Amino acid sequence: AAPYNHRALEEKWQKIWDEEKAFAATEDYSKPKYYALVEFPYPSGQGLHVGHPRPYTALDIVARKRRMQGYNVLYPMGWDAFGLPTENYAIKNKIHPKIVTKNNVERFKGQLHALGYSFDWEREVNTTDPEYYHWTQWIFLKLFQEGLAYKTEMPINWCTSCKVGLANEEVVNGVCERCGAPVVRKVKSQWMLKITEYAEKLLEGLNDVDYIERVKVSQRNWIGKSQGAEVDFRIAGKEDKLTVYTTRPDTLFGATYMVVSPEHPILEKYKNEIKNWDAIAAYQEQAARKSDFERSELAKEKTGVEIDGLRAIDPVNDKEIPIWVSDYVLMSYGTGAIMAVPAHDTRDWEFAKKFGLPIIEVVAGGEDVQKEAYTDVATGKLVNSGFLDGLEVAEAKKKIIEFLEEKQIGKGKTNFKLRDWVFSRQRYWGEPIPIVNCEKCGYVALPECELPLELPEVDSYMPTDNGESPLAAMTDWVNTTCPCCGGPAKRETDTMPQWAGSSWYFLRYTDPGNKEALASEEALKYWLPVDWYNGGMEHTTLHLLYSRFWHKFLYDKGIVPTPEPYQKRTSHGMILGENGEKMSKSRGNVVNPDDIVMDYGADTLRTYEMFIGAFDLSASWSENGVKGCRRFLERVWKLQDILVDGQGYRSEFETRMHQLIKKVSSDYENLKYNTAIAAMMSMLNDFSKAGSISRGEFRTFLILLNPVAPHITEEIWEACGYEGRIYQCVWPEYEEAKTVENTVELAVQINGKTRATVTLPVDVDKDTAIAAGKEALGDKLTGNVVKEIYVPGRIINVVMK
Ligand code: ANZ
Ligand code: ZN
């Protein structure tokens, strides 16, 4: 064969596939469908990195295989293009973010195209396209109309450098996830989405989907359902009571003090009666500078101040106990106040030890509670607890809740860690929120016919120092009339967070050109749910939760036909530098995929990224590994030179071929791309060793390899004169019976008497059979062999003297 010229042949086939619209999903709804989805990228200025092709290639393999299996496959791609980096770049370089986005998208698209992905480019979406965000705004309006979007004053996480409010999730260890600058708290009026209303549904839905376990676990943890009770403690000598949330109402008799969070309103209310107010106020100020994350760290040294002048009364034994202020209690969870049970809660125990507060055991079963908190709930019986004594924890919980409810001093209560979603950003490059604020009517939705509300041109994209979006400076745009009363009103100038556009993009792919709806009912009905969604572990909490929330809401509104958007979710590991560290400019270990495509070819890059290691684990880049994959493809190329006639599989390869089809087919479905490739490598060795490969064997081999290395296999296919295109082929079948070695058990005799047995292939030749028989006889073979008899399928007989 001619030399393997990857550059020419990869370009050639990419062009042919485009012309033939080889991978377009069709509207033939009578065919079985398969919807494969990867997370659409943020088109950053850096272009594609070698991390991107790992998930894209994996699902490209699945998509290509499913097409060959007769499915109508939707494998789309698009751009999640609103967001801060583009805006920051635009500010720095004084280029409109629209232009920056356009350039970045072009670059990304070119790079993806060069990798030969079977994306249906006819369905490309871009979250910054007004025809797209029309529907993002429309969904927002639906949420608003249902009371699930509301505006409220609240302390937000404020990045001092990006000058933008961040969701809790975007604050990592007290600093901004994007830029690393410190995050402070700032009270602002914010749009919020009531995701908390869907907490239970988001949790339950996990039982009906096929997500890898760690994804389910992270969703569950983020939702954070906890069951317990609210209990009222009277404040001695006052009308007021202090309500706590506890998961352990069974330990009520062991409460030795209470703690309120530094922001608890009770403090302000009794300011004048609190004798050590100065100390409390100083402590409040200190706490305001810490993030919730820092405050709730288990390991941190406990701090606090006892309130001088207020005491609480334990409702079960009327004991008076002190009330402390400490930052380990957060205002944003439960009631912002707790009953402290140091004997059975680790944080309370540390606090009690530090401040010399009493520790009273109420569940017996562990070590001395003066030495360590006993937190086990599965074993132990109640003690020192009056009417609860002798009960197990679970029984005691039930009984105490009944008691509290009967006395009307408490009730069973379920809490969630999940908070409402802060949906405002004070930035330019995002979807405008389609709301106007009228003095008379309040917040009013824009009529649907005014959508999309397009982002206006502004002179500067700089956010203002007082934390307002640059849109606020555009008085012409801001001043408008109220859709409700016609009076003067102002437009909302906050924009949506980057999470908005990605919360429903998979719906748009089903019908991207629709002008009347986010997608037609028929398209949604046919394509949903997404059959397989693969994405990064970093998106398994937020993006997944947010998009499931929107989907469930749309389902409740009758807009989408399925309660869950994604049937299956998997996740890939990261690709690290040669040194095993994260690739980054500062470490100088970034590999540019363009260079690999240029030097070795897209097929080599694809093969390498699939061969690099177990798909769900991170893996270190290795240039040698790339070379190894290139050599493999070169050897596949050379098989053309040893091709021999024969449509079927030759007998010595039949079992191996059936085994190979079985293994590759199942490995592709089970994220085991690396072992599928290893099996093909080993098969290739056998053909090379044999010095020949039949046309039938090569045909199957090429189809199996095609999803991984689509260009080289198409080229060989054509060069060898196989019919049509390989992408139009039917995926090979295997016969289960033929995957097992065709073997038979033979009796091994000495002078006609059976002395051993051996299992050999049915068609084993005489020499091999005799040799195996002799080996099985071992020591029993003494004397001189005079004759060797082989009756195929029956016996091996050694005649001795
Ligand atoms: C008494 C108690 C005794 C508790 C015991 C635990 C063990 P989860 O599972 O996270 O819901 N708590 C309640 N509100 C809090 C707040 N705003 N800030 C910090 N801690 C708070 O945990 C609920 C438990 O965390 C509650 O149950 C309360 O402590 C504490 F042996 O009440 B517990
Ligand atoms: Zn009005």
Image (cartoon, rainbow, N blue to C red):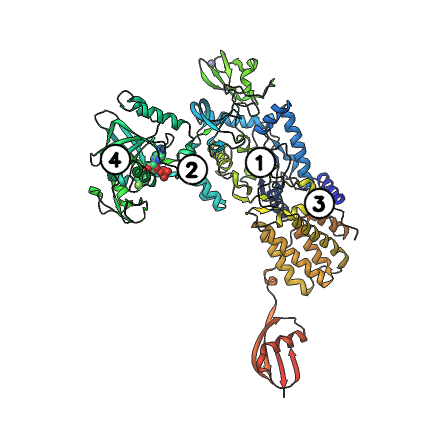
CA distance for labels 2 and 1: 31 Å
CA distance for labels 3 and 2: 45 Å
Between label 4 and label 2, give the one nearer the viewer.
2
Res 223 label: 2
Res 601 label: 3
Residue extending furthest right? 2
Between label 2 and label 1, give the one nearer the viewer.
2
Q: Is residue 283 left or right of residue 675?
A: left
Q: Give the residue pinned by disc 4.
A: 405
Name the spot of residue 428 as percent of width and height, x first: 56, 23
Q: Give the residue pinned by disc 1.
A: 523
Residue at x 67% of width, y 73% of height: 765
Q: Quadrant of ligand 1?
A: top left
Name the spot of residue 739 as percent of width and height, x first: 60, 61
Is there CB contact under 8 Å for labels 2 and 1?
no
Against 77, residue 235 (above or below) is above
- Kindly tell me whether residue 307 is visible in this rendering: yes
